[in-house]
Image (cartoon, rainbow, N blue to C red):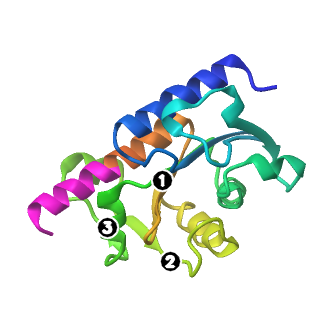
């Protein structure tokens, strides 16, 4: 049973991700981990309008409830297995994605981006959505960085909380916009 506080947390952060323009109406996904328990957004959920029915509780190993989960569950599990993350936010911010087509690293020019993120790795996978290969390259990149971008698909950020992971995605998108304005 997913408690009210967890539902509220997902609802609030999901709304923040959507209102900030970091994903489309049905794009992106989020999860939290508590030991062997993961709570993740369901497949096809709208981050801007999450409710209790939009969250699914699963374990670290595949199980029957996986069918309801975001397709990116394989990536979330790999990141949790490789890091000490307590939460993951994945979104589709357009400036960050556009930069991922040509860059292997996104280096912010702005002070906040440099301080909070430093160099952000951009990783490549032949299949970008919900693939075991994407899970491996993202988990590896996120061992060292708080956020990594899957080329053409968007950032995955890990944090102690959903709020922290959201911050990394938000700061990255702001930094990408600054770089665009500077013509870099």
Q: In which quadrant is the N terminus drawn? A: top right
Distance of label 3 from label 1 (alpha carbons)? 20 Å
Q: Determine crowd level at label 2: few under 14, some 14-19, many 20+ residues with C-alpha closer than 10 A.
A: some
Circle 2 is placed at which residue position? 124
Note whether 78 is above or below 127 in the view shown: above
Q: Position of residue 130 (x, y in %)?
A: 65, 65
Give whichever of discs 3 and 1 has the lower sequence position.
Answer: 3
Does residue 90 appear in this view? yes
| Residue at the extreme left of the image, as rendered | 182
Note whether 40 is above or below 152 in the view shown: above
Question: In the rendering, which numbered label is found on residue 98?
Answer: 3
Q: Which residues are magenta?
A: 172-184
Q: Position of residue 47 (x, y in %)?
A: 52, 38
Question: For the residues carrying marks 1 and 2, which lies nearer the camera in this image?
Answer: 2
Look at 30% across and 68% down and name the residue there. Answer: 99
Count of marks overlaid on the render: 3
Depth check, front residue: 20 or 136: 20
Q: Quadrant of residue 6?
A: top right
| Residue at the extreme right of the image, as rendered | 64
Q: Inspect the magenta stretch and tell me whether residue 179 lies in it.
A: yes
Circle 1 is placed at which residue position? 146
Distance of label 1 from label 2 (alpha carbons)? 17 Å
Q: Inspect the magenta stretch and tell me whether residue 180 lies in it.
A: yes
Look at 67% across and 35% down and name the residue there. Answer: 54
Distance of label 2 from label 3 (alpha carbons)? 14 Å
């Amino acid at each position: 049973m997913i408690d009210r506080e967890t539902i509220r947390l997902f609802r609030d952060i999901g709304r923040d991700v959507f209102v900030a323009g970091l994903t489309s109406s049905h794009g992106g996904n989020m999860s939290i981990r508590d030991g062997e328990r993961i709570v993740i957004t369901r497949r096809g959920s709208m981050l801007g309008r999450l409710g209790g029915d939009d969250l699914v509780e699963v374990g670290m190993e595949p199980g029957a409830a996986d069918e309801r989960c975001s397709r990116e569950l394989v990536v979330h599990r790999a990141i949790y297995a490789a890091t000490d993350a307590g939460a993951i936010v994945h979104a589709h911010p357009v400036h960050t994605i556009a930069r991922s087509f040509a860059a292997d690293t996104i280096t912010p020019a702005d002070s906040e981006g440099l301080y909070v993120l430093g160099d952000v790795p951009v990783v490549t996978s032949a299949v970008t959505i919900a693939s075991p290969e994407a899970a491996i390259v993202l988990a590896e990149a996120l061992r060292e960085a708080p956020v990594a971008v899957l080329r053409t698909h968007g950032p995955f950020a890990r944090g102690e909380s959903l709020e922290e992971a959201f911050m990394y995605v938000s700061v990255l998108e702001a930094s990408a916009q600054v770089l665009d304005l500077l013509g870099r």
